[in-house]
Image: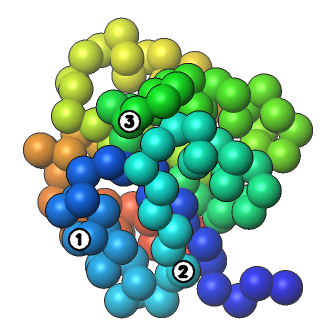
Amino acid sequence: MKNKKLILIVEDEAVYQKILSEKLTAEGYTVQIIADGVSALASALNEQPDLVLLDLNIPGIGGLGMVKRLREDERGKNIKVIILTNSPDIETIQTAMQEHVFEYFIKSETKIADLVLKVKNILG
């Protein structure tokens, strides 16, 4: 039985990876960072993280492609996902929400502290 919650950060921006990882680790979470969609999908299905923080603009299959494939697999259907992006495109937001994404944050408009608070609320 895991006692620490596992958060998978799927993000290719090194600075954002580091900030998120440090803040979430300080809150007592176990953090795994992966920068591309293909590796992240494999990890999510195998590791069964409690939450995925997913950038839409990642190399490989991209964030929306990753979340679609995650939802198509029995092991990934119930994994909580928060989308992180710099694109306020309404169509992208709607597509993400159709894939049962928990929340959607625009990075440039979101304070890390607010994101950490949302993570804590989701994971209890």
Q: Residue at x 12, y 45 (%)?
A: 109
Dot 3: within a 10 Å radius of its alpha carbon, few (fewer than 14), some, or many (20 or more) residues?
many
Q: Dot 1 corresponds to which residue?
A: 19
Task: Indicate the secondary structure of the residue bearing disc 3.
Answer: loop
Image coordinates of residue 72 in percent, x first then y, are 78, 27
Q: Which residue is mark 3?
A: 58
Mark whose residue sits in front, 2 or 3: 3
Judging by the rendered image, the residue that carries numbered circle 2 is 30
* Residue at image location 64% in from the left, 43% down from the top: 41
Q: Secondary structure at mark 1?
A: helix
Q: Residues within 10 Å of mark 1 (few under 14, many from 20)?
A: few
Residue 117 in the image: above or below residue 23: above
Q: Is residue 101 left or right of residue 110?
A: right
In the rendered image, the vertical position of residue 21 relative to residue 34, given as above or below: below
The numbered mark at residue 84 is: none
Measured Cα–Cα span from mark 1 to mark 3 = 17 Å
Residue 31 percent coordinates (x, y): 50, 74
